[in-house]
Image: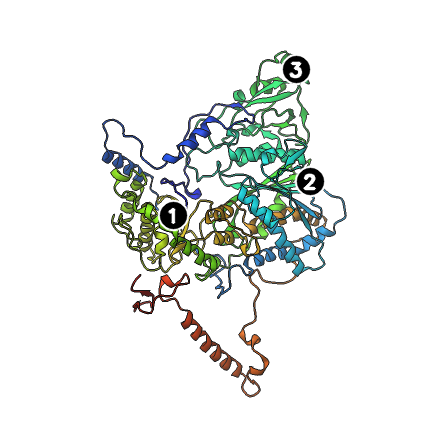
Amino acid sequence: FEAEDEEDEELEHDSESSSEEEPEPRARSRPKAKPKAASKATKNTSAKGRSKKLAPGTSREDELAAMLKKAHAAYKPHNNPQKFPKNGPYVDPVGVDPTHGIVEGIVTAQVRKVGKLLQNLTANEGDQELCDLTFPLRLQTACSGTDAPSIALGLITESLDKLDPSHSFSYTHEMSCEIEPFKQAYIGRNFPGVPLFPDITKLTAGDTVTDVYGRPQTLPDGNLFIAGTSCKDFSMLKTRDRQDIEDYGQSGQTFLAAVEFLEVKQPPVAIFENVDGAPWAKMQEYIRGRISLGERNNTKAIKDSSKPGDADRELKFSVNERGEYVAEVIPRQVGIRAGSVVEGFVRGEDDPNDVQPLKASSKSKKKKDQLITLGELAKEHGIDLEDDILVFHKKARYCTHLSKLDTKDYGLPQTRNRKYLFIWRTDNPTDDLGSYFQTILDHLKTPLLYSMDAFLLPPTHDRIRCFREALRSGPGLMVKRERRKQSDFWVYGESLIKDVALHMAFRERNGIEERSRWLTGWSVRGNTVAPGLWPELVDMWNMRRCDMIDCFSAAAMRDAISRDPLHHSFSWDISQNVTRAPFRSATVGVSGCVTPGGELLLPHRGRTVMGYEKLLLQGIPFSRLLLGVESEVQLSDLAGNAMSVPVVCACMLAALCAPQLRREKESSKVQVTMVDWKLGEGTAGAVLPQRGDFHTLPAEIKPDTSTDANADAHEIFTRIGRELSQEAHDCSVLCTCESSGRVASPDVKLLSCTGCGMGICHDC
């Protein structure tokens, strides 16, 4: 049980960028110590959400009134109509456990779609391009977390074993890199023997690298590098203190280290993953080593201001002993590393491969102690600042293609928008391989067959029961006692929590009375919980979260289509802010984005989404993994920072097959479509059909169908129905207190609703 900040972060899809002062350009170099500004920001986090000292002449009432006015102005109603899946109603799994083949079926459907391309690729013995991947694939991952790419490659291999037993697809997991100790332990258990390194920023520091066990090792070679570098500083969840690449926060350092890895190890193919709000245009400039001068002042930085940049004066170079221009001072909107050497430039109308070399003139060489601006350099060499391209020296040339992908488009009921950067080796800066990559990605999209409820564990599952018992035991009781000591959230003069203004504005704008708390019934004296919610879980929440639940429940009932949240599938992220988190998802049956610190409440289940369920929503079959003593917080961290398995699987299949698809289209004399590469027949479903109870009956008790063709159905289903009804009666849950392995006392009166049949014991 962890303490929470009172002021919540902002949802990525409801973000607002704050205006900032114009940042000064500065020389970029990797500092040895963390900047003081970042340390200062860290120290202040404990005061988040609480009011500071009053200004002279103002009262708490005045402060609350000002905050309420601001909250009203910032409020945005969530009145977008809900959509249903494009492919019709969801499939009812009818008792299928979420760990039984759903994810495996999605991956199999993807492999089947490009199966013939994979066959031709593995059989290809012709000339290889720089971007071609050879077998066995040699996978390298950085910022690995759950190592979803390795899991996906394993599922691809299993799928091919079923679809094409004679296949020659194979892979090896060459290395992982992860800095979190509990994630290192997870990788060590689930991927034994794989070299594991602790820090991506030190991978290329020397000839040998120290692994997590303290042993010096040589960095292994690979041909497929996948990095999900830190998104913490880039994420729109951070409404304040977002950091750019050049601020050398966690996100900037890990990204620059991944680029350095590309320079040193030069793998043929790489895939980078990060949030939608990352500075992708600038990140691609870092990788490609080419700056389109017509876009030199475009706002590509996170900390942009309304005032446009002036790279003509702010981008400055020095001249080295060989007469080369070296970048020294770089404005934020330009993706160049300090110390990068200019190779030349390309005229706008010329062939992009025709790089005209740049060497300093004798006049510029005399100014060794002075810096030369981009404007001066362009004037001296006749460079057109609107059309030409500035080219920098690179040890290996790469091209890039950026794709925005949503997890729900690949078979999982979760809205998770992430961008994947496909990076491939090539000497041609206009290489069109990215278009083939995108074509395959679009072809691999999978219908959303199952709603979020199909990925939830049943109440009788051991994980659910253990968690509920933990809430009822010592730690849970301790948190409950601490919650009772809190000041009244609704009385601002006592709690001094700024969020109360947001809750007041939400209630007023939605026509909800201040004391309408019918779902949690929260007060300083405790909670009066509606039937269905776990009372022991509600006791863990502070008043802000309880009031947020009541706000959302009232909003759901006052919606255009009124719905009772206790009987309809909702998922509310109560770790967010009441005015930022939507009370209903845009697509029915689809959860919001799984984040490391997110807490998704399922009111119709009476509980939050468990860490294991978050892993399943990411396509990670936890039942096939060796999970140790990871806490709920750590499991949520694993899931929230992971790549969705079907999405990264689609990216790897597209990266594998794109060169082969281009060769096939160029050599084919007839029009070839993506459907032509399907391997075998089969549906896009997730679970293979299983035979029913009739086929499991012993031969001696099967009915005789020689006289009556329908006898088998009548007799079998009569018998099955009788047995099922008895089992249902014996194991029926008559009260919510029985759903964790308990049975209500026979002396306690059981009440039943005459309308819906819901049961509850007198004690509850």
- The answer to which of marks 3 and 2 sits earlier in the sequence is 2
> Circle 3 sits on which residue?
361
Nearest-to-viewer mark from 1 and 3 = 1
> Circle 2 sits on which residue?
221
Q: Nearer the viewer, residue 22 or 551?
A: 551
Callouts 1 and 3 close, C-beta under 8 Å: no
Look at the picture and state if 130 lies above or below 411: above
Q: Quadrant of the C terminus?
A: bottom left
Neighbours of disc 2 within 10 Å: few (<14), some (14-19), many (20+): some
Quarter location, residue 688:
bottom right
Image position of 520 (left or right of 388): left
Disc 1 secondary structure class? loop
Residue, x 44% and y 44% (percent of image)?
597
> Circle 1 sits on which residue?
574
Q: Nearer the viewer, residue 749 or 297?
A: 749
- The answer to which of marks 1 and 2 sits earlier in the sequence is 2
- The amino acid type found where label 1 is placed reads Ile
Image position of 587 (left or right of 532): right
